[in-house]
Every structure is written in structure tokens, then in C-alpha cells.
Amino acid sequence: MQPIIRGKATRHKIIVAAVFAVLPHLAYTEEELPEVEVTSNAVQPDQPSEKTKSYTVKSTSTATRLDTSMRETPQSISVITRQQLDDFRILSVNDALSYATGIKVEQFETDRSEYKARGLNITNFQIDGLNSPISFSGTNYGDLDVAVYDRIEVLRGANGLLTGIGNPSATINFVRKRPTKEFQAKVDVSAGSWDNRRLDADVSSALNADGSVRGRLVAAHQDRNSYLDRYSTKRNVIYGVIEADVTDNTNVAIGHTYQQNDSSGNNFGSLALLYADGSKRHYKVSDSTAPDWSYRNVGTNISFAELTHYFNNDWKVKGQLTHKETTSKGPHHYVYGNESRATGLGLFSYPVVYDFATKDHVADIYANGPFEFAGRKHELVVGATWNKSYMKEYSRAGNTIGNPINSFDSLGDFPLPTFGPESKSSDYQSTTTNIYTAAKFNPTDTLKVTVGGSLLNYELEGIGYGILQEAKERNKFTPYIGAVYDLNETHSVYASYTGIYRPQVELGSDGKTLAPLKGKNYEAGVKSEWMNKKLNTSFALFKSEQENQAQAIGTVIDPLGNLITSYEGIKATTKGYEFDVSGEMSDHLNINAGYTRLMSIKGNQDENVNPFIPRHLVHVTTVYQIPQIQQLKVGASINWQSDTHVDIALGGRDVRYKQESYATLNLMANYQIDEHWNAALNLYNVTDEKYLSSMRYAYAGQAFYAAPFSGLATLTWKY
């Protein structure tokens, strides 16, 4: 006899309960613990962007933990919302950040990327406002998925208040999806160029009758080949979160995110840009130095728990715990040298197995709420963060190091070498504590002043590439002050000052870590709200002054025989300006656009440094819902950057390599078939622009080409 299931609500609860029952078995591996997350039932001031369907948000707490509108935040901030991620079928962090004002994605290898803002490397990353380092240096390994996030917030400029580490580039805050009381489900099936196949599933609902316990599960699987010879990737993502209202004023949340990113035929290093005589070497877009035996498997597990209590006087206390583990394993083949035009010889082999493992433990507790002073209401936040991180690197050298390579065309068939015994390249651990406070004063109806600071203690110890590494700082204070003045109901002017301080892990020519980065960050501008606060615009002038800014000066062989990048600390001054606009221009038109002008990045001798970073960046994204065909919306996104160059050392002289300015165009169309089904087509790099993916490490003479024209078709079912 078949069981009888009565009513949609009952069926929904059974489906969700069954999904969460199998979640731990899907996410668990021998090295990884399952993660569960919980979200509050109380009204959240920062409403999820998936609910608003907008290209902007009304408030953010990334800068100070004080829930503040975009207009009242005294720094530049932009948001990539869930609606924009869905419209352009944005699947990875690299792709998402290319839609953010002022961000330059530097993918210098197939599986390693860095992110730049205002001419400098981004090292501050957060998840739900809590520090979550991508790596010690800010390098992203693998291809992080965005299926689990509601939005991505980018705060440009220093953010030493909450992180304790005031990096003058930007802070990237990934805001997770949260459970809903109402049952909702969504499945996306995609197919595209180079055998790209993807399946996404997202289900959320209350787990009991009164909705005091809610859960959400997000899963994604992607398998694809590539425009690059021999390169392919496979990605699996599972995110589970449960939240419960313990009382009317207290809620808890626990969650886990698991991602496994496996690639084969990945490059380590890239294509030699010059021949031995200094002339430019030309390649097909698909060319790669990687043999078919190279691979990189990157696994990430993030577990977290939250407890939030709301007091009757509008104060809130929130505690968060996070544990993150990342592992990366794989053999690689670095190819160095420059070919002779006449013989094709001049390339040499450097095979190596490179593995690493990182662990991060983060705890944070803070309280925020209103207080009265001089007859007016103000806001205060007080909190503390503790962070302990571990980093271990291992390597095994191949027996063909230094062997000549017959020709570039033979690289794909290069035989798998024999690798020697494993050596521990590095074994670091760092401990950071940060006590922070900020107050937003409202001395008049039109003036808001935010004053705060953080007190940092930091300790780094361990072995790095055969050399003892030690660094210690005690009671390092980083100030923060910002003011916003309303000119009228639409426009405000603002100014802010933030201290810069960041302990560094980059190694100098002596093999020891550089001294901490120190400096000051200034910003001033105008912010406006239009269209009944549905459209935000901003203009910002910025300047930062730094000491000990890490500047790459070349590669060296360490005492263990590893090829590593060497840095020197320089004085650096950056200045420029930015425009940003996001939101609804009309009932039918959404926009997200920005322009960044880096007027200068000056070094010790007032010389321009980091010329691989474009001095002009433009992005414009628009989506239009056609009034005559309400079911159809179309959109376009264009990114443009100015020319860049590097000077490559070759044979005792510097050879300048220049990449001209270029633009890429993406198009989208989405048709709503009925209330449950819709179909979409996304086209990328429509003009088939040929350009180098990154000039970040081109000073070492290597780079590779970005993807040519491609497409992705998606069929979506929603309930």
C-alpha cells in the first residue's frame, strides 16, 4: 500500500527533512567535517538581495558592524547582488569580482588568482562579516563557487576597524544565503561551450509547524573541458544551514560549506612571452605548457556557528565561531627559459609536486545598539576577534629539473618524471587578536560622524623555505573616523581617514619576512540616492600613503631548492578617483556600473610602480525588461581597461612588453515561460577579444590568454 501524503506543506517538510538527513553523508570525507549553519527568525535589517531582486542593497555593515545605508557609509562600497549573479549566470568568484567597480582579477595561472583594488593586492576577505582568509598572501587556489552566497560586498579602502589589518586596497565580504520560512526550491541545468555541464539545486523551508526552525540546502556540480589544451575541471559544492529561534529574542545558526575543485592539465607558470632575442612570441589562445599528467585538487571545508540575542532596548549581542580547512595537492610542470627563433630550443623543465594545507580558527563577539547623549540618539558597537591560522607547504622535486625541452609543441607529451622525497617547505602559524569599537554620532539631523579604532596583537612564527620566520606586534592601534553630511534629501558629502597596518608574509631577498605594512588612507566624496532610494550613486577621491609595500623583484632558489618570488619593501603612494552607480534606473532597467582612475602609484623615488595594473577601469552592466514582452529581459555587460606593460629582464637588459587596452562584451537573454520555468542564454566575450588573462607575473616573462567567445544555455525550474 502506498502512503498517503496530505497537502503541499506536508510534502515540503518531508522533502526538506529527507534532504537534510542525507547532507552529512554527502559532505563528509576523511579529512573534512560537515558544516551546518543556522539563521535568525528575527527581522534582519540587511534584507537578502534575492528577495529584493535589485542590483543594490539598502544597508550594509561591512565597514563598521553598524547597520548603515550605502549613502551613510563614509567609504566607497559596491555590491554584486544575487539578481545580477543570476542574470549573467555568474558561477565563480573570479567572474563575480570582474563586475565590481575598481576590482582587477589577476588570474596568472589556471588555478591561482589574486585580486587588486586601487593598485594594491586584496588580502582582507570575510564571510558574513567574519574574517576568512583565502590564504596567507591573498592568493586564491582553485575556482571558488558563488552558489552559496546571496551577494558579495566590496568595501574599497582600508578596513582596519573590524579586521585589525588596515589594507588600503579593499575588503571583500561574502554574504551567505539564509533559510526561509516559506518553502522555496530552484533547480538550474546548464550546458555550454567546451562540454560545460552544470547542475544547481537550492531548497529552503521551515522544518517545523511554527517556522521557528528553518533549513536550507544548496548543491552544485560542474564538469567542463576548456579552451586551453589538455585542461579540464570538475567542481562539487554542498552548503547546508539550519537556524532556530531558541526564544523570541535568541536564535542560533550552524552551517557547513564543502567545495572540491579538481583540475587536470593545469598550468604552473605560463607561456614565455619573448624569444631569446627579445622579440615577441605569438601563441594560439589554446596554447599551454601543461602536460596531461599535471593536476591540482583543492578542497575547502568551512564550519560555523552563531548565537544572536536581541534585547528589548534594541541592543544586540552576536557571537560567531568558524573553522576553515583548505588542502591543495598535485604535480606540476614549470617551464622556464626562452626559445631560440632558429632552433626552437631554450626551454627547460622544472617539475615539482606542491601540496599545502591551511587551517583557520576564528571567534568573534560583539554588541551593538543605540544610546542617548546630549538629547540625541546615537549608535555604538564594541567587539573582539580572535584568529589562529596554520599554513604548511610540502614539495617534491622531479628528476628532470634543468633538462632541456626539445620544442614547445612537445610539452603536452612531456613524460611524467620521478619525484624525490617530500620536504616541508614551510610551517607557519599566526595568532591575531583584535579589540574594536566604533560609535556613530548624530550631532544634527544632517550630520553623522563615525569614530572608532582597533587594538591589534599579532604573532607569527615558524619555518619558511628553510629559514626561521618570526614577527610580533603588541597593542597596535588603528584609528578610524568618517563623517557624512546631508546636503538635501538626495545628496550627501563624506570624508574618512583610516590607519593602515598589515603584518606581511612576503619574503625579502634575505629570505625573511618583510616588516609590517604601515600607512594612512584618505577618502572624500559625494553619495546620492535616486528613484525613491532604489538607485545609489557615488563619487570618491582617494589617497593612501604606505611604508614597506611589498614589491616583487624577481625569483630566487631557496635553501631547499624551491623557486620562490622575492620582494622588497618600498614606500608607495596611490591616488585616484572612482564613480559607482547601482540599482534601478526605471521600473524596467537595472544598472551596475563604475569607473576607476588610478592617477598614480608612486614608489621610493617618485617613480611609477606596478605598471601591470591598468590606470583606467570601466565596467557597465544593464538589464532591461521589455515592456511589450513582459516575460523577456535582455542585458549587456562591458569591461574595458587601459593599456599595461611590464619590463622583462632578459640577457642583462630589460625588454618592455605591452598589452594594449581592450574591452570584453557579455550578453544575456532570459525568457519566463510560466510561473515555474524560464530559459536563459548567456554569451561571453562576444567580440572574441584576444588578451592576456593577467600581467601580474609577466615581469618574470610569462602569461597566458583568457577565454575566447563562449556560450551557456540554462533551463530553470522554480517553486
Image (cartoon, grey):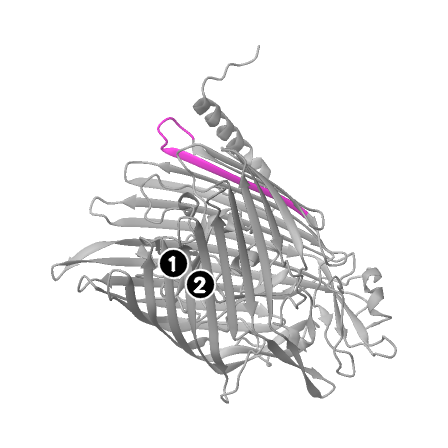
- Looking at the picture, tell me which residue is in the foreground, 597 or 635: 635
* Residue 109 magenta-highlighted: no
Which secondary structure, mark 2? strand
Q: Write down the region rendered in magenta.
A: 207-223
Q: Residue furthest top?
A: 1
Expressed as whole percent of the image width and height from the top left, the position of residue 510 reads 59, 81
Please tell me which of labels 1 and 2 falls first in the chain.
1
* Crowd band around label 2 with a 10 angstrom C-alpha radius: few (<14), some (14–19), many (20+): many
Q: Residue furthest front?
A: 628
The quarter of the displayed image where residue 486 is located: bottom left
- Looking at the picture, tell me which residue is in the foreground, 555 or 143: 143
276 with respect to 140 (left or right): right
Asked if 456 appears above or below 370 in the picture, the reply is below
| Position of the N terminus by quadrant | top right
Expressed as whole percent of the image width and height from the top left, the position of residue 365 reads 34, 53
Q: Amino acid at mark 2?
A: Thr
- Looking at the picture, tell me which residue is in the foreground, 231 or 418: 231
Q: CA distance from mark 1 to mark 2?
A: 8 Å
Q: Would residue 659 be visible to someone looking at this image?
A: yes
For disc 2, the marked residue is 171
Disc ID at residue 62: 1
Dominant secondary structure, magenta: strand
Contact flag, marks 1 and 2 (Cβ < 8 Å) = yes
* Residue 221 magenta-highlighted: yes
State how many labels appear.
2
Q: Amino acid at mark 1?
A: Thr
Asked if 350 appears above or below 670 in the picture, the reply is below
Q: Residue at x 45, y 66 (%)?
A: 170
Q: Would residue 415 be visible to someone looking at this image?
A: no
Expressed as whole percent of the image width and height from the top left, the position of residue 258 reads 56, 46
